[in-house]
Amino acid sequence: MNVYTPNYSGPIQLIAKPGWYVGLFMSGQWKYMQVQGYETVPESRNVSRNFGNIVAGGQSALTLVTELQVPSSEFIQMRVKPIDDVEAEIYVPSAIRKWSLDQVAGRVDWWTQISDPYYASTEFYVMGSDRDANMVVYNRTDYALNPTRFHFWGFRYLVDVINVKDTTPDEREKIKKSAMHIMNDFGRPQIDWEVL
C-alpha cells in the first residue's frame, strides 16, 4: 500500500498527478478516486478567513469555512496558519476534530511554526461539498482580538470518484494496490470493497 506522508522538510507537495488513483480515509472508510487534473491554491488574502472579534479568553462557535468548499467532483489538500495571535481546531467534517488524542486535541497557532516551519503538521483534506472544513478559533490572550485571521494554501484536484459496484475484481485490486492512501481521520477502517 502506498501511503502519503506530508513533506515535513519543505513546502507542500502534490499527492497525485492526472491518471493516478487516490484512496482517502474519511469517516471510517476508504473513498477511492482517480485524479483528472490539479492546480495550486496559493496562499493569499483571498484564500483566508477572518473569524472577527473574539473576546479575551473566548472562542468562536464551530464555523463552516466557506472559502474551502469545493464541488463533489473535487478535493483539496490544504495547510493552514494563523496570521494573528489566535489558535484553532479543525473539524473535517463537522463532527470529526483533527489532531485529536483521547482527552485533548492539538491546535495550530503561532508556536506551530517553531517546530514546523512549513506547517506540514496542519495538512488536511476536504472531499467535496459533503465533507466541509469547520474551525473553532480561540483567543488565549487577556484582551479582545479583531481581526482573527488564518491563511490556507495547497492543491485542488479534479477527480472521478470510483463507484466500486462498476468495477471488476481485477480493476479493484489494481486500484487498491496503486492508489496513494491518505489518512484524513481515524476510525475503524472498512477495507471491504463491498461497503465502500
Image (tube, rainbow, N blue to C red):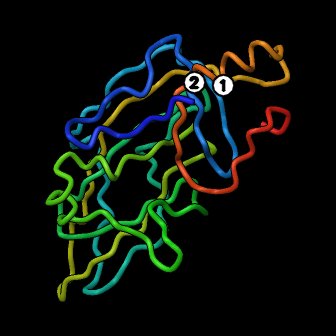
Q: Which mark is residue 120?
A: none
Q: Which amino acid, mark 2?
A: Ala
> What kind of element bears circle 1?
helix
Percent across and percent down for residue 152 are 30, 45
Residue occupied by mark 1: 176
Q: Residue at x 52, y 63 (%)?
A: 97
**Distance from the alpha carbon under mark 2 to that under mark 1:** 6 Å
Residue occupied by mark 2: 179
- 152 vs 108: above or below: above
Q: Quadrant of the N terminus?
A: top right
Q: Kindly indicate the quadrant of the structure image that contains residue 178.
A: top right
Percent across and percent down for residue 93 are 58, 54
> What kind of element bears circle 2?
loop
Q: Is residue 185 left or right of residue 120?
A: right
Q: Kindly indicate the quadrant of the structure image that contains residue 99.
A: bottom left
Q: Residues within 10 Å of mark 2 (few under 14, many from 20)?
A: many
Q: Is residue 136 left or right of residue 28?
A: left
Q: Quadrant of the C terminus?
A: top right
